Image: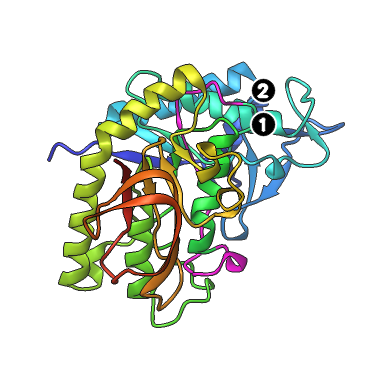
Amino acid sequence: MGFRVTLWTHPFMNLDSKAFPEAAENHYAIGTRGSHNPALVRWWNGKMAAILDVTNPAAVQWYLGRLEALKNKYNISSFKFDAGEAFFVPEAAQTFKPMSSPGVFSKEWAELAFEADPYVRHQEVRAAWNAQNLPIFVRIFDRWSAWEAVEGGLETLIPTTLTFGLLGYPFVLPDMIGGNAYADSGFTGGAYPDRELFIRWLEASALLPALQFSIAPWLYDEEVTNITRRYTQLHEKYAPTIISLARESVTTGNPIIRPLWWVAPEDPAALTISSQFLLGNDVMVAPVLVRGARRRDIYVLEGEWQDLLRGQKISGPVWLRDYEVHLDELPIFERA
């Protein structure tokens, strides 16, 4: 059908997997200090597994060879490289090359991910440490299907995305639209996040560098499907701007998604706002992030701005109090 397909992969080898005996025999797994045995860690659903020693060049090539075999056999394009966080490294770890910090594990895992697809670069990682040099999408850590920041929900999306860009990771991949829909996320009403949360999450993501779906919009209703189609088309409209900013980031280090204070560093209001963001310097986005809200306060920076939602010009700096935002609307302002 012409789709590019990626597979989920990770550095773990379950005890009952075919990879585990080979990894143990050849010391491809992180060992236990003072022993030749693989160190075991607990990961997905409490499973015990060995973990790939990414400091060992032979282990890396072995792993990459297995991925290449999958690509050739099943016409796979690339991979989603999950895990890789430093907290998975056992305390008494014995690695092929001594690590100055557990963060080295994350860096080497990202390097491995890049080597798996260095040309087309469809891959993603979710862990990064001292790896700003890699031209690769870095996904933010799992978001919960909730609204509030304290629950790791939608309110954390913009601050986390901004942080990634400021730390030197401009190619930020927001997490799933609507959150991960874990059973213990705290949402009610069945197996999926509530309808309103899905729509607001979609709107908040529409002008970020990429859209990533796990929950299909047609699981809700036709209206949600049509809203989703509209915002994916909006993302496509701004794709040339995103690509241009991505090219800029390579030479300047500037993030693609920027906090308001990026262009107004001496504006006290701009320094405190975490619910709006800039795409470059000239497009400002102010999504609704609160359950049930149909209005929000929006801060317009200094200068002349075109309100694309209401079709009016606004001179900043100014607060737009109780700005009306219907469920299917996203406030966007472009510098006039």
In depth, the one of 185 and 10 nearer the eye is 185
Does 33 sit above or below residue 147? above
Image coords of residue 86 (percent x, y) = 69, 39
In depth, the one of 128 and 40 nearer the eye is 128
Residue for badge 1: 105
Image coords of residue 134 (percent x, y) = 51, 23
Does 297 sit above or below residue 71? below
Does 313 sit above or below residue 303? below
Left or right: residue 316 compared with residue 244 = right
**Residue at 37% of width from left, 26% of height from top?**
121
Asked if the magenta segment contains residue 141, the reply would be yes
Image coords of residue 74 (percent x, y) = 27, 34
Q: SS of the residue at dot 1?
A: helix
Residue 66: name its quadrant: top left
Residue 28: name its quadrant: top right
How packed mark 1 is, by other alpha carbons closer than 10 Å (few <14, some 14-19, many 20 or more), is many
How packed mark 2 is, by other alpha carbons closer than 10 Å (few <14, some 14-19, many 20 or more), is many
Asked if the magenta segment contains residue 78, the reply would be no
Q: Amino acid at mark 1?
A: Phe
**Marked residue nearer the N-terminal end (2 or 1):** 2
As drawn, the residue found furthest toward the front would be 315
- Which residues make up the magenta segment? 131-152
Q: Amino acid at mark 2?
A: Thr
CB within 8 Å, label 2 to label 1: yes
Residue 243 visible to the viewer: yes
In depth, the one of 144 and 259 nearer the eye is 259
Q: Quadrant of the N terminus?
A: top left
As drawn, the residue found furthest toward the left would be 1
**Residue at 54% of width from left, 73% of height from top?**
184
Image coords of residue 231 (percent x, y) = 24, 54
Residue for badge 2: 55
Q: SS of the residue at dot 2?
A: loop
